[in-house]
Image (spheres, coloured by chain):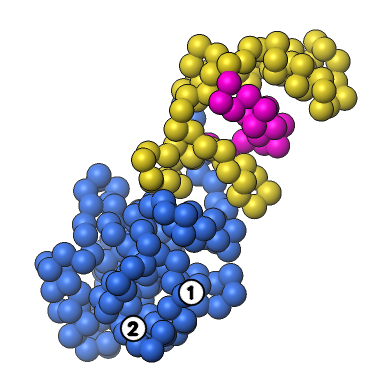
Amino acid sequence: MKIIEGFVLRPLGDEFIITGEGPAQVNFNKMISLNSTAAYLWRSVEGREFSVEDLTALLLEEYDVDEATASKDALAIVNKWIEIGLVEE
Amino acid sequence: MKTTRISIPNEIMLGSVRDLIKEGHSVVIMTKGLSMLPFIEGKKDSVLLVKPEDLKRGDIALAEVAPDKYVLHRVLEVNDGKVILKGDGNYRGQEICPLKKVAGKVKEVQHMDGSATDPQSPMQMRRWQRWMGIPAIVRRYYLAFYRRIKRITP
């Protein structure tokens, strides 16, 4: 799967937001906020093909969690991204 | 999809807005406050902001009038590298800031029903000029009445 083109992750204070950007327009009324873990995953897979296993590996690399938890979290986040239309399979 | 309204401190969000406009983006933000009534209603109207090129009297501008303090107000005068601004709904009080502190100007006011108005159109400029021609005290009472019938709260 892949992040759909046109979505851009930006830091905003202590948070991260994703804005859908047309040719030049940024709409602050339509943005999605990400926590720092989700933002880390987003940055790591931006612009390339990735799988749930890739996200699991990224979580294991960065956080002190067991594989089962990482895999469950990775799947949850992918499902969320697909549901809100940020990622295409 | 679940939508939540998140409120970000003005100085952080508007700092980002300023940077994005500088990079050449146009930016849509939701407005706050009552100071631009009756032309912009906070929490209901959004504005499309673009680079503040050729800023002139009658434009609506987003300006940093003190460190981290932004206003979205009407430009009354641009002179000698300085800008004087005032909220249409404020019967007294003006802001003065250097021209380079103007982050953007409003190209479009977007209303909740999906319609939009161009504040620079001749019709909107005439509306504003008529509004400014009304004595301040009358404007003040009119707005108090307007807020009451439209149930507008800060």
Residue ID at (35%, 87%): B79
Circle 1 SS class: helix
Residue B66 shows up from this direction: yes
Residue B101 circle label: 1
Q: Locate residue B89, reporting x and y percent.
A: 33, 75
Residue B78 circle label: 2
Task: Indicate whether A67 appears above or below B95.
Answer: above
Q: CA distance from mark 2 to mark 1?
A: 12 Å
Q: Quadrant of residue A20?
A: top left
The colour applied to the residues of chain A in this rendering is yellow
Residue ID at (81%, 27%): A62
Residue B149 circle label: none
- Give the amino acid at mark 1: Lys
Q: Quadrant of the C terminus of chain B?
A: bottom left
Q: Identify the magenta region.
A: A32-48
Would you say B98 lies left or right of B76 here?
right
